[in-house]
Structure formats: structure tokens, C-alpha cells
Image (spheres, rainbow, N blue to C red):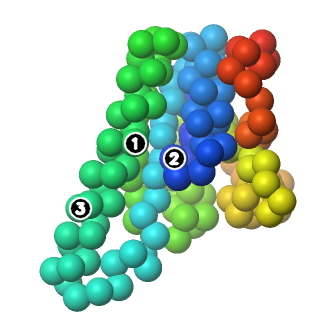
Amino acid sequence: MRKFLVVLDDSRECLNAMRFAAMRAAHTGGGVQVLSVIPPDEFNHWIGVGEVMRAEARERIEAHFNVFAKWMRDKQNVDPELVIREGVPLDEILAQVREDREIGVMVLGAGTGRKGPGPLVTSLTKSAGTLPVPITIVPGELSKEQLEAIT
């Protein structure tokens, strides 16, 4: 089954990327894989404190994922899968794409602020020619109705 890979983070544009991926998966018989990366700098503390922080980060990610997963199941009849990796986000995203052969498309949300589309979109589009899958960039300003019309 072809999977749409979506990166889960705290950005506003992440919501549109999730919606787009779920709608496309529902219309094409595909799946959705949600990837969240815990950066290593969050755990540069004493060992005990780092372990507690890692557990808290995983709990936050799972709670955030469960909100999206419920919507995907209820509204799109898509059962997403969660993958949590630790490391440098760009490196971990690329590693996930290369390791999971079922990933067919990477879906990213583009920010709408003055700072540009966001660091992931900027970094990944620079290396788009060498990626093993295409990237779909979903504008953060699209409404639900616009997303439904294009998926």
C-alpha cells in the first residue's frame, strides 16, 4: 500500500498537511504515516532528567497524534500509523523515507508568515531532486473546502 508521509510538529500548517494526506489516502486507497522527530537537544541533561523529558515528549506527540488520528478514522476512514524518531529532524525524515519502501509521497505544510514556508520545506525542496519520493507542499492558507476540492 502506498503511504503518504506527513511530519507532525507544532506548526499551524501541519494541520493542512494532515488533512491533505488523509483526504488523498482516502481517495486513492492509500495509507498515512505520521512522523514526529524528537530533536536530540531536548535531552542534553542528566541521564534521569533526560529520560523523563523523553517520556514527556513521547506523551505529547501521542496525544497530538491521537487528535489527528481520530479525525482521519472518523471522517476519512483512514487508520494512520505513528512513527517517532529521535535525532536531527531533517536527517530522520530522510532516513524514514529511505527505510520505508511503502512511502510514496511526502506531504509538508508551508507556513504563511514572513519567515517563509518553514525550515523543513526550505531544506527538503533544496534536495528534492535526490529524494526517492515526490514532495507535495500544501499551502497553510487553504481552507478545508479548498483541500476537499483538490484532493
Q: How many marks?
A: 3
Identify the residue under disc 3: 55
Q: For the residue labelled by badge 3, is the local secondary structure a helix, a strand or a loop? A: helix
Cα distance in 3D space between marks 2 and 1: 8 Å
Of the image marks 2 and 1, the number of the one nearer the N terminus: 2
Q: Nearer the viewer, residue 55 or 83?
A: 55
Compare marks 2 and 3 and give the one earlier in the sequence. Answer: 2
Residue, x 46% and y 59% (percent of image)? 37
Residue at 48% over, 40% down: 34
Q: Secondary structure at mark 2?
A: loop
Q: Is residue 54 above or below residue 61?
A: below
Q: Position of residue 33 (x, y in %)?
A: 48, 36
The three-letter code of the residue at mark 2 reads Leu
- Residue identifier under label 2: 8
User: To which residue does mark 1 refer?
Assistant: 64
Residue extending farthest front: 114
Say which of 67 and 37 sits in front: 67
Left or right placement of residue 120 versus residue 1 in this view? right
x then y, percent, for residue 46: 22, 88
Q: Residue at x 45, y 21 (%)?
A: 71
Q: Nearer the viewer, residue 33 or 117?
A: 117
Q: Is residue 58 left or right of residue 142?
A: left
Distance, label 1 to label 3, CA atoms, is 14 Å
Quarter of image, res 74: top left
Tell me: residue 94, above or below residue 139: below
Contact flag, marks 2 and 1 (Cβ < 8 Å): yes
Q: Is there CB contact under 8 Å for labels 1 and 3?
A: no
Which mark's residue is nearer the viewer, 2 or 1? Answer: 1
For the residues marked 2 and 3, what is the alpha-carbon distance in whole angstroms? 17 Å
Type of residue at label 3? Ala
